[in-house]
Structure formats: structure tokens, C-alpha cells
Image (cartoon, rainbow, N blue to C red):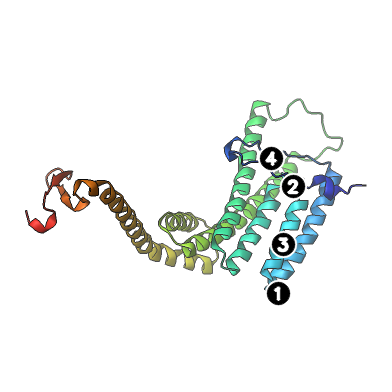
Amino acid sequence: MTTRTERFQRKPREPKEERDPVSEEPETVVKFSPEEEASLLSESNTEKASANALFAASKFREAIESYDKALSTCPNYLHYEIAVLKSNIAACHLKLEEWKEAVSAATAALDGLDKIQGNAIDVAKENKTNGDGDEEEADEEIVSEGATKAEDVSNKGQREADIGRIRAKALMRRARARSEQGGWATLQGAEEDYKTLSQMPNLSPADRKIVVRQMKELPPRTKLAQEKEMGEMMGKLKQLGNGILKPFGLSTDNFQMVKDENTGGYSMNFNQGGPSDGK
């Protein structure tokens, strides 16, 4: 007899030849009854609590495994709960100085939060199109309209606050991982993350201090990384060019780029003797 968890978990894929990831079908969303969903979520939360305890004990590798178990039980349409788990996994990878994995986990958390907000927009549009459910049957119990609206606003406000809190954590973790990982494109990504964080009102004073410092320190690092990578790229291009020109008794030194100060454009001059001619 299969358990609910076993029925929910996906079967491992059989070894197949590689497929284009763009052409793969989207993940199937399996909806559960309220009772089944509550049971699965309870299992997931129990595993998450164990993972949190392992994290507190600095057992980060074991914590990742436990968070993964919590993910395997959690219904895949509960994007908020999944985002929390992914963000916690990112924190573990940061502790292990596994920057690439931390970026991946934090990005997955942010993608999940984006899905929540996207779904909320879709529901709002649908309600507007359907006249806000005018044809629905009346509730058996009459509740004050004002009380109902106040409760909805309160719940919505709390949910938005929770999403904002996890978004800030995931962004802080991704930005830190990107800044440690280095590289021109990655450092640019870190700058973008810190810029987004600087505009968020829910940061703690300690996090805001980090954001302000990083926004000052990152641009020079990004520029140096850009210059280094551009230099390396030009060196490889020069090596390639020399290989092509060598049979003709030439090298890239025979070609010089000259900037036109009036137009800002460049022209190429050919020098038979190379730069040593001084011509």
C-alpha cells in the first residue's frame, strides 16, 4: 500500500539521451484534497523543523538533505512554503561557501514568490471579469460585510508581509553569493540585487548597512572584472588572429586601430613593418 507521500513524490527519470530543456514539458501540478494537503504539509513542516535544528547545530550538509526531504513532501503548488525551503537551502550553501549552489537555490525561491504574485494578479483579473462572483450562492451564515472585508485585508496584509520578508532574505543570500562568486556578469547581478534591496522598506538595520556598503564596494570590483575579462578575450582573439596571419608573414601587430578624435570612430591602419617601424 502506497502512502500519500509516495504517491506525491515524482518517480526518478529513466536514463535517456539528453533533451533540449526548452522543449521539456512543464512540471505537472497535482492538486490534493484539503485533508491530503494538510497531511502532506504537516509532514513537510516536521522535516523542516528537523532541518532548522541541524542548521542551528552547524550541520549544514545534513540540513540540506533534510530540507530536500521537506521539499519532496510539500505539494508543488504551495509556492510560498517551497520558497521558504529554497531560501533556507541557499543559507546552508552560503555557510558551506558553495556560491553557485546558493545562487541557484535563492533564485528558485525568488521565482516561487514571483509565481504567487502572478497568481494573485490573475485571480484579481478573473474576479473582475466574472463580476466578483455575483452568481455565487449566499453563505448559510450571514456575516457583516465590513467584518469580512477587514479580515480579508488583514490576511492579505500579513501574507504580503511574509512574502516581502522571504524575498528580502533570498535576495540578500543571492547577492552575497554572487559577490563572493566573482566574475563580471555575476558581480553585475549582485549589484542589481543590492539595488533592489536598497529600495525595500522591510530590511533590518544590519542588512541595510550591508547593502549600503556593498553598493559602494561592488562597482570598482565589477569594473576590474570587466577589464580583466575583456583583456583575456582580446588576448585570445589576438592569438587566433596571429595563427591565421602567420602563413602570410604577418601578425596582428601589423594592424593598428586609430581613433578619430572628431567622430569618436576607429579606423584600421596597416603597418608592413609592425609597430617597431615607428611610422
Residue at the extreme bottom? 57
| Identity, as a three-letter code, of the amino acid under mark 2 | Pro
SS class, disc 2 = loop
Q: Amino acid at mark 4?
A: Glu
Residue 227, placed above or below residue 243: below
Between circles 3 and 1, the one closer to the viewer is 3
Residue 27's tag is 4
Dot placed on the residue nearer the N-terminal end, 1 or 4? 4
Rendered residue at 49%/60% (across/down): 178
Whole-angstrom CA distance, mark 3 to mark 1, is 14 Å
Viewer can see residue 202: no
Residues marked 3 and 1 touching at CB (< 8 Å): no
- In the picture of the structure, the residue carrying the numbered disc 2 is 12
The mark found on residue 57 in the picture is 1
Label 3: which residue?
Answer: 65
Dot 3 or dot 1: first in sequence order is 1
